[in-house]
Image: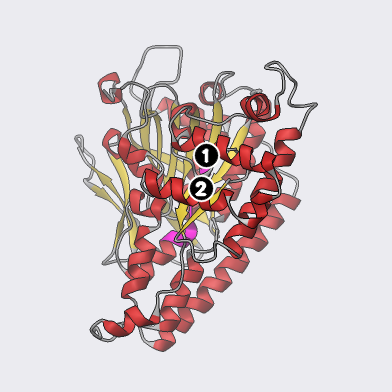
Amino acid sequence: MAGETPLHLREPGPDPETQRQLIARILASKPFKRSQRQRELLEFLCRQAFEGETKDVHEQAIGVAVFGRRPDYDTSQDNIVRVHVSELRKKLEEYFKQEGADEPWLLEIPRGNYAPLMTPRIAPVAEAVLAAETEPPPVDVPRSGVQLAAIALLSVACAGLFLWNLQLRQQAKAPPSGLNPLWQQMFTANRETDIVVADSCLSFYTDMVKHPVGLQDYLSRKYLLEDLSKERDPERRKSLEMLMGRRYTSYADVQAVQYIAQLATIHGGSVNVHFARDYPTRRLQTSNLVLVGSKRANLWAELFDDQLNFQVEYEQATGGNVVVNRKPLAGERPVYSILTRDADVRDSLAVVAFVPNLQNTGEVLLLAGTGMSGTEAAIDAVVSRSGFERLLAALPASAPGRVPHFEALIRSHAVGGAAQTFEVLAARLIQPAAKSRN
């Protein structure tokens, strides 16, 4: 059915009967026995989210249905829903820490919306299960390697937090003044714009386990449950579990958020920032979308693979990223890669793609580099007026007016790790036929 989320994109969760039983146990628990209003609120939210009565749960609808407010009441003046949902989150946390400590599924209401989600509880693998299974061959990563990996991880994590806080405290480097036609299409009155930043922990994780993770398993966290159940080294298992319990992104992603937020102000729009692991699939239909990072750290990008000719791919053998040119034209190479020349001066590659969303109802901008300097160059190519004009000039001729859907492969020249200049190596228009999702 048109406009409906495909089955494989829906939020993963338990079967309906398991959902109903969990909700019933929560409603009968001590934290909820004393508050009829909290029970009514939770029942309403779960009914809307899990029984498919609506595609989203809005504050105004909650106020009318649960708290008896008039249909036209002003939510900016009456915060009853926000107050009660905040209290509801606390009660759910209390339940899962006490009476529901052994529940295999968690029910939570992510901050920023009112739609409950059920996610599997990630717990250490039971020692009894481990002991009953056949002892596997020794892990190929030595103990010292695990320790070094953990130290490196913590160092990067601390550096990421430091850079994030530093960036937020510095005065922003404002994009050039004037309206950018790309962002005039990204910021529209009838659609919100979401920025989804990369999950840097995921790329570390795939390095450690040496296998990729698919989007559906990523959303359900099935991959982690399976990998933890197979891992026999307690230190390594703890490192994997700790790693995927954190939420870190890169400095380039922080820059993207900063610059795009400024562009939103210039163009009269607004942005919502999401971590890749927490992005609600339902928003794919209702929002314009900016995906920062390659699909190795931002798996949402893989949804748009079939629309793209240029794709950033990770080579396990070399431990580096390349750009695959699926249908090379005359003078183009099938694979583009960069060899590091020295520590201070290096080049990087990036793909900038502007495509329709899965239902052809909104826009998606993908910014993916083979390294951080490449991602920075991709960001500069779309947030800088002069950079975007250079990008447009490299595109094949198209009808005047709106910015056409396109993809471009760019090469950045970096000094000291900062992207300074870029050139367009190849570009394609994405033809209307490629947009059909029927």
- The C terminus appears in which quarter of the rendering? top left
Could one spot residue 339 in this view of the protein? no
Residue 361, by quadrant, is: top left
Residue 2 in the image, given as x and y percentages of width and height: 33, 21
The image quarter in which residue 57 lies: top right
Q: Secondary structure at mark 1?
A: helix
Mark pair 1, 2: CA separation: 8 Å
Residue kind at label 1, given as amino acid type = Cys
Give whichever of 231, 169 is nearer the camera: 231
Q: Out of 45 and 431, give the one closest to the viewer.
A: 45
Q: Which residues are magenta?
A: 195-202
Q: Which residue is mark 2?
A: 23
Measuring from the top left, give residue 422's x and y in whole percent.
46, 43
Numbered mark located on residue 385 in the image:
none
Asked if 83 appears above or below 317 in the picture, the reply is above
110 versus 41 height, above or below: below
| Nearer-N-terminus badge (1/2) | 2
**Quadrant of the drawing holding the N terminus:** top left
Please identify, in this view, whether the residue under mark 1 or under mark 2 is nearer the observer: 2
Give the residue drawn at x 33%, y 78%: 129
Question: Could you tell me residue 329's position as x and y percent?
Answer: 20, 35
Which residue is at a point 70% across and 15% down the rendered structure image? Answer: 72
Name of the residue lying farthest toward the right: 77
Q: How is the image coloured?
A: secondary structure
Q: Are marks 1 and 2 in contact (CB under 8 Å)?
A: yes
Q: Position of residue 350 (x, y in %)?
A: 40, 45
Query: What secondary structure is marked by label 2?
Result: helix
Whether residue 201 is in magenta: the answer is yes
Q: Is residue 329 above or below residue 434?
A: below
Residue 46 in the image: above or below residue 317: above
Instruction: Write down the residue under mark 1.
Output: 46
Q: Is residue 74 left or right of residue 245?
A: right
